[in-house]
Image (cartoon, rainbow, N blue to C red):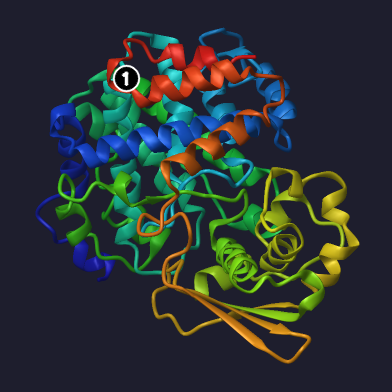
C-alpha cells in the first residue's frame, strides 16, 4: 500500500497508538503477556549486566560524563551516576552491544534495549514506579515499536531497533508518567525529530550500532520532557507525507497491524537470543548443535557447509569472513559464527573478544562456509533456514529449521532462560554476587509485588 493512499485515511494511526498506550491498564494484560514481559525483563537486565564488559562500554561512560552534570540515574554494574538522559544512552547500549538481547522476528526489532534503557533511567530519576507499572510500560512499549515493524513490506533500510524502537521507548516512559493522549501524541512528534539509526555501522561492525539505540532511549526521555513542557510536535508522524512508514520503510500496510493493538500482544511474539550474535546467524548454530547431537559430527569430519537463509539474513549477515574482525563484525558474520559453533559446540560472549577473533582454526573453517540466499518472498523474514553439511566421507547432512531455537514456537525453557541470565550475570565488568543474581530472579518472578523498581537497579550495581 502506498504512502499516497495512506494520506487519505480518516484516522491518524498515531491517535490509535496513543489511545492504546494511555487507556490500557495492568488488568487489561492477559497473563501470557505478563509472563512474557517478566521473562524478557529478566533477560534484558542480564544481557545489560554482561554488556557492562562489552566493547566501548567504559569509554562511552567516560565520554557521556562530559555531556552534563547530574546524578539522577545509575549505570548498570559500573554504578556511575549521570543525568537520566545520559544513563539511558549507556544502559541501552549495554543491553544491545553484545547482540544478546531479545528480538521480535515479525517486526525485526530488538525492542527491549531502547525501552529498558529509557525506563531504567526514568525509574531511577523519579522513583515510586512499581513492578506492575514496569510490566505494563514494557508491554505497551513493545507494542508501539513492533507495530511499526510489522507494518513494513520493504527490506529493512534503516536500523529498526533504534528508529522504531524510539517510539516504543517514548510510549513506555509516557505510560510511567501517566501522560494523556494529546501530550503523548506531542511526545511522539518530538521523538520523531530525534530518531537515529542507519545500517552503516551494522555493515562495518562499528559500536555506533548499539549507540544509536542509546541515542533513541535518551530521545524518548527528552521527548516526554518537551511534551510535558507544552511543546506541540508534528502529528502526522506515522503515515503522513513525511511520516515514519513512508520515509523509513517505504512500502507498508499498517491497517491490520494497528487494528491488532490490544488483541495481539507483541511481547508474546518476542524471541530469545540464546547466543550473543546476530539473530540472523542463529540458524547455523541451531543446525550445527542439532547435527552434533544427532550425528556426532566433529570439525575434522566437515568438508564444507552451506547456509540457506532468507534475503534479509543474507544481506545483513552473509558477509565474508575476514582475518581480524571487529567484535560486531564477527557477531554478524555467518561464516565466523558457524565455524565457532562447529569448533566449540556453542557460541558465547568469550568468542567475540581477544584471541578468538584471530583464531586460525576459526578462519580456516569459515573459509568453507557459504551463505546462500533462498527464494523467500518476505523481505523481513528471519526463517525458515536450512543448513547443509558436506562431510569428507561423501555424506550430505541437512537440517531444516522452520523456526530457529529461541522463537516463541521453539522457545528456551524457563531453566534455560535462568541459566542464560546467570551466565550473563557472571560476565559483568565488576564482580556481582550469586546471591544478588538469585534475588534478581526472585524479584522479577514476583514483579507484581515489587513496590519500587529502583530496587532492581540496586541489585545490578557492583
- Residue in view at x 25 percent, y 65 percent: 253
Extreme-right residue of the structure:
360
Please indicate whether residue 79 sits to the left or right of residue 401 in the image: right
- In the image, 261: left or right of 402? left
From this viewpoint, is residue 219 visible? no
Q: Residue furthest bottom?
A: 394
Q: In the shown orientation, is residue 347 left or right of residue 148?
A: right
Taking the spot 66% from the left edge, 18% from the top edge, the residue there is 78
Image point (64%, 34%), residue name = 51
Residue 194 drawn at (x, y percent): 46, 38
Q: Nearer the viewer, residue 346 or 164?
A: 346
Between 427 and 181, the residue placed more toward the observer is: 427
Name the residue furthest left: 10
Q: Nearer the viewer, residue 227 or 302?
A: 302
Quadrant for the N terminus, please: bottom left
Q: Position of residue 154 (x, y in %)?
A: 40, 69
- Whether 85 is drawn above or below 409: the answer is above
The location of residue 20, given as percent across then percent down, is 17, 38
Number of marks:
1
Vertical placement of 269 versus 384: above or below? above
- Residue at 23 percent across and 23 percent down: it is 179
Which of the 4 image quadrants contains residue 282?
bottom right
Residue corresponding to mark 1: 131
Compared with 266, 312 (above or below) is below
Return the x and y of residue 50 as percentages of the image width and height. 63, 33
Mark 1 closeness class: few <14, some 14–19, many ≥20 residues within 10 Å: many
The answer to which quarter of the image holds residue 451 is top left
Q: Is residue 91 visible?
A: yes
Drawn side of residue 74 relative to residue 28, left or right: right
Badge 1 element: helix
Of the 4 image quadrants, the one containing the C terminus is top right
Amino acid at each position: 500500500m502506498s504512502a499516497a493512499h495512506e494520506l487519505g485515511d480518516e484516522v491518524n494511526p498515531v491517535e490509535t497508538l496513543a489511545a492504546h498506550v494511555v487507556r490500557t491498564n495492568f488488568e487489561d494484560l492477559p497473563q501470557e503477556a505478563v509472563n512474557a514481559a517478566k521473562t524478557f525483563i529478566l533477560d534484558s537486565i542480564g544481557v545489560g549486566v554482561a554488556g557492562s564488559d562489552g566493547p566501548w562500554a567504559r569509554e562511552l561512560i567516560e565520554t557521556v560524563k562530559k555531556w552534563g552534570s547530574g546524578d539522577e540515574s545509575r549505570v548498570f554494574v559500573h554504578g556511575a551516576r549521570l543525568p537520566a538522559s545520559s544513563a539511558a544512552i549507556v544502559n541501552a547500549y549495554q543491553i544491545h552491544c553484545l547482540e544478546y538481547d531479545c528480538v521480535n522476528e515479525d517486526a525485526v526489532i530488538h525492542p527491549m534495549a531502547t525501552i529498558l534503557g529509557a525506563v531504567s533511567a526514568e525509574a531511577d530519576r523519579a522513583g515510586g514506579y512499581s513492578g506492575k507499572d514496569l510490566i505494563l510500560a514494557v508491554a505497551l512499549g513493545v507494542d508501539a515499536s513492533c507495530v511499526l515493524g510489522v507494518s513494513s513490506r520493504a527490506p529493512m533500510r534503516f536500523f529498526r531497533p533504534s528508529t522504531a524502537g524510539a517510539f516504543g521507548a517514548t510510549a513506555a516512559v509516557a505510560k510511567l508518567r501517566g501522560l494523556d493522549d494529546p501530550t503523548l501524541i506531542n511526545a511522539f512528534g518530538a521523538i520523531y525529530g530525534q530518531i537515529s539509526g542507519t545500517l552503516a555501522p551494522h555493515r562495518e561492525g562499528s559500536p555506533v550500532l548499539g549507540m544509536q539505540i542509546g541515542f533513541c532511549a535518551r530521545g524518548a526521555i527528552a521527548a516526554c520532557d518537551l511534551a510535558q513542557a507544552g511543546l506541540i510536535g508534528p502529528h502526522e508522524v506515522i503515515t503522513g507525507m513525511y511520516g515514519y512508514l513512508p520515509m523509513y520503510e517505504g512500502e507498508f500496510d499498517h491497517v491490520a497491524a494497528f487494528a491488532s493493538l490490544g488483541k495481539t500482544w507483541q511481547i508474546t511474539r518476542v524471541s530469545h537470543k540464546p547466543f550473543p550474535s546476530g539473530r540472523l546467524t542463529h540458524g547455523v548454530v541451531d543446525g550445527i548443535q542439532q547435527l552434533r547431537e544427532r550425528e556426532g559430527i566433529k570439525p575434522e569430519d566437515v568438508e564444507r557447509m552451506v547456509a540457506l537463509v532468507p534475503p534479509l539474513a543474507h544481506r545483513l549477515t552473509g558477509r565474508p569472513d575476514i582475518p581480524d574482525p571487529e567484535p560486531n563484525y564477527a557477531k554478524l558474520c555467518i561464516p565466523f559464527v558457524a565455524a565457532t559453533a562447529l569448533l566449540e559446540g556453542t557460541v558465547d560472549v568469550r568468542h567475540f573478544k581477544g584471541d578468538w577473533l584471530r583464531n586460525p582454526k576459526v578462519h580456516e573453517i569459515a573459509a568453507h562456509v557459504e551463505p546462500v540466499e533462498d527464494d523467500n518472498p518476505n523481505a523481513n523474514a528471519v526463517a525458515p533456514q536450512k543448513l547443509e553439511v558436506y562431510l569428507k566421507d561423501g555424506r550430505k547432512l541437512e537440517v531444516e529449521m522452520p523456526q530457529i531455537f529461541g522463537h516463541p514456537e521453539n522457545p528456551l525453557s524457563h531453566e534455560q532462560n535462568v541459566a542464560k541470565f546467570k551466565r550473563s550475570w557472571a560476565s559483568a565488568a565488576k564482580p556481582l554476587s550469586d546471591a544478588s543474581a538469585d534475588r534478581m530472579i526472585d524479584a522479577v518472578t514476583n514483579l507484581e509485588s515489587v513496590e519500587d523498581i529502583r530496587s532492581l537497579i540496586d541489585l545490578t550495581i557492583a
